[in-house]
Image (cartoon, rainbow, N blue to C red):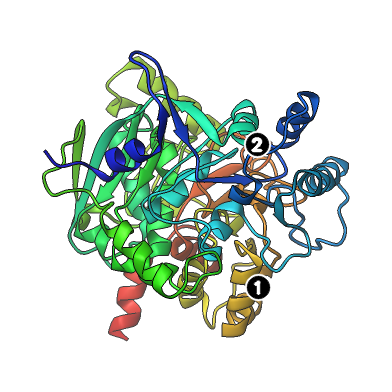
């Protein structure tokens, strides 16, 4: 019987196994940032322990870093966390992409772009969206602060092996539909708990035809469907992306690595605990209207009505979401007015995301009621975008062009959506207060966010692109 990539990676990393107990698995890469690491370092210090494998640990500052002027840090908590991380990395011998490093950026952006992230790895970080790295054919997941300390001290982690879920998407995507729309559609159709207890393997020709940056967007939001992790079997697209990156083997070493990576791909007769199939033709540009990612509809649709709810719990959930969001049942998605636009986050802040957005706004101006921010995912992304002139297109349209960091995704520093105002956001969570107390978040793709910035409300970007093609 064949094996899935999930089985293959897990089996290669089991250090100790006992019946009825979690497995002790080896961790290949531990990514660290300033928010969830201070207590872990303190724990090591109190127990007089060292970091077991500092060469397999890499740190950056991303959550608290100012994106308007990184030289001026007014928040004392942010300043303390960043300086503490710098001191900890120096003491324990960990490489840090700090405030002034050309490699600084959101941890889930710089891991892949530096080539730290590679197929077959187990990767952890004190951040829930570590699942992003699964796009390369790795098992990657977020961990808590106590687990951060355990990995630092032992380079291992106790884990119960999750079940496997095969999510197969086939067909050609409609015009204006991006990877972000795909994963929002999956969650809207199946709910925020469909992946609970599973690692998801995304496959099918739709996934196979995606770029690595698109696959990262898909895997990034696996956690929003309840999954422990999400991944894609490595292929030629994966290898082409990795070749030549800083921490990837060179020459014959790369060729040997590719031979090993090819064997990781799921066997054709692999079995899974659960399978979901989706037709790409059913997916349209999506907009979240509620307070969790499953509360999402196609841009051409209406917000659900209470009378359509099947249970009292559904009615209560819908009623509460509409009250918080200031929306009405049956309201057209395209009638939702927007005051803020945020293009960024570990979900959609890579070069391809910025390129897609500029294709929509080129030669246009943002709506006078809209404040729009673009926050590149890393210093490398920022530099590349500026080399292509993307920053000029954004600024000419009226966007604020920022430094790299997590920013408005989780309302850090001054990048906050005011209470009661609506934001079209390329981030990954629309929970109450996520972008600021009382902020109303709508999850969308970079193209949809760009279009909302221009029109001041949501529009069907697929129709826009079709109209431009006709002209």
Q: Which of marks 1 and 2 is nearer the N terminus?
A: 1
Where residue 117 appears, as percent x and y from the top left, is 49, 56
Measure the C-alpha gap from mark 1 to mark 2: 25 Å
Picture quadrant where residue 25 is located = top left
Q: What is the quadrant of the C terminus in the image? A: bottom left
User: Does residue 354 show up?
Assistant: yes
Determine which residue is flagged by label 2: 438
Q: Nearer the viewer, residue 260 or 136?
A: 260
Q: Is residue 180 visible?
A: no
Which of the pair 349/147 is nearer the observer?
Answer: 147
Is 108 left, or right, of 17 in this rendering? right
Q: For mark 1, give the secondary structure.
A: loop
In this picture, residue 359 sits left or right of residue 453: left
How crowded is the residue under tag 2: few (<14 C-alpha within 10 Å), some, or many (20+)?
A: some
Residue under pointer 1? 398
Query: How many dots with numbers?
Result: 2
**Residue 433 at x, y percent in the picture:** 63, 36
> Which residue is located at x 44 percent, y 56 percent?
118
Q: Where is residue 139 in the image (x, y as percent from the top left)?
A: 40, 43
Q: Position of 204 compared to 6: left or right?
A: left
Q: Assign a secondary structure to mark 2.
A: loop
Give the answer, above or below, for where 268 lies relative to 149. below
| Quarter of the image with the N terminus in it | top left
- Judging depth in this view, the residue of 397 and 148 nearest the camera is 148
Q: Residue at x 60, y 52 (%)?
A: 107
Which residue is at a point 48% across and 74% down the rendered structure image?
244
Say left or right for 127 vs 68: left
């Amino acid at each position: 019987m064949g094996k899935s990539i999930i089985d293959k990676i897990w089996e290669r990393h089991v250090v100790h196994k006992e019946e009825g107990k979690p497995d002790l698995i080896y961790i290949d890469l531990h990514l660290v940032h300033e928010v969830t690491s201070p207590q872990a370092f303190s724990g090591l210090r109190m127990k007089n322990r060292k970091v077991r494998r500092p060469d397999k640990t890499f740190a950056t500052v991303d959550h608290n870093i100012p994106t308007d002027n990184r030289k001026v840090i007014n928040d004392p908590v942010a300043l303390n966390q960043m300086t503490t991380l710098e001191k900890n990395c120096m003491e324990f011998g960990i490489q840090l992409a700090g405030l002034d490093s050309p490699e600084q950026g959101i941890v889930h952006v710089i891991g892949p772009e530096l080539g730290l992230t590679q197929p077959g790895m187990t990767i952890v970080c004190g951040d829930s969206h570590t699942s992003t790295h699964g796009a390369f054919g790795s098992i990657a997941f977020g961990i808590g602060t106590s687990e951060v300390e355990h990995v630092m001290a032992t380079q291992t982690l106790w884990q119960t092996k999750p079940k496997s879920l095969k999510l197969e998407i086939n067909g050609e995507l409609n015009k204006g539909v991006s990877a972000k729309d795909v994963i929002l559609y999956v969650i809207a159709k199946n709910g925020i708990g469909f992946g609970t207890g599973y690692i998801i393997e995304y496959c099918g020709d739709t996934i196979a035809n995606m770029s690595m940056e698109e696959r990262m967007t898909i895997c990034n939001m696996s956690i929003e469907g309840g999954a422990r992790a999400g991944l894609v079997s490595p292929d030629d697209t994966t290898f082409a992306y990795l070749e030549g990156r800083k921490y990837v083997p060179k020459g014959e070493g790369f060729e040997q690595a590719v031979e090993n990576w090819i064997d990781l791909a799921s066997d054709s007769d692999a079995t899974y605990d659960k399978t979901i199939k989706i037709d790409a033709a059913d997916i349209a540009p999506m907009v979240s209207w509620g307070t969790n990612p499953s509360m999402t509809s196609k841009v051409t649709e209406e917000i659900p009505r209470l009378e359509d709810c099947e249970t009292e719990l559904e009615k209560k959930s819908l009623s509460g979401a509409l009250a918080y969001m200031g929306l009405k049942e049956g309201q057209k998605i395209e009638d939702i007015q927007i005051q803020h636009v945020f293009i960024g986050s570990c979900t959609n802040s890579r070069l391809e995301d910025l390129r897609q957005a500029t294709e929509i706004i080129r030669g246009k101006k943002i709506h006078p009621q809209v404040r729009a921010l673009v926050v590149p995912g890393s210093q490398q992304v920022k530099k590349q975008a500026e080399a292509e002139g993307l920053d000029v297109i954004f600024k000419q349209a009226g966007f604020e062009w920022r430094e790299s960091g997590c920013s408005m995704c989780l309302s850090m520093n001054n990048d906050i959506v005011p209470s009661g105002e609506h934001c079209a956001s390329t981030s990954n969570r629309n929970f109450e207060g996520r972008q600021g107390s009382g902020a109303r978040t709508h999850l969308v793709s970079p193209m949809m966010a760009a279009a909302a910035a221009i029109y001041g409300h949501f529009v069907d970007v697929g129709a826009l692109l079709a109209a431009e093609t006709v002209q």
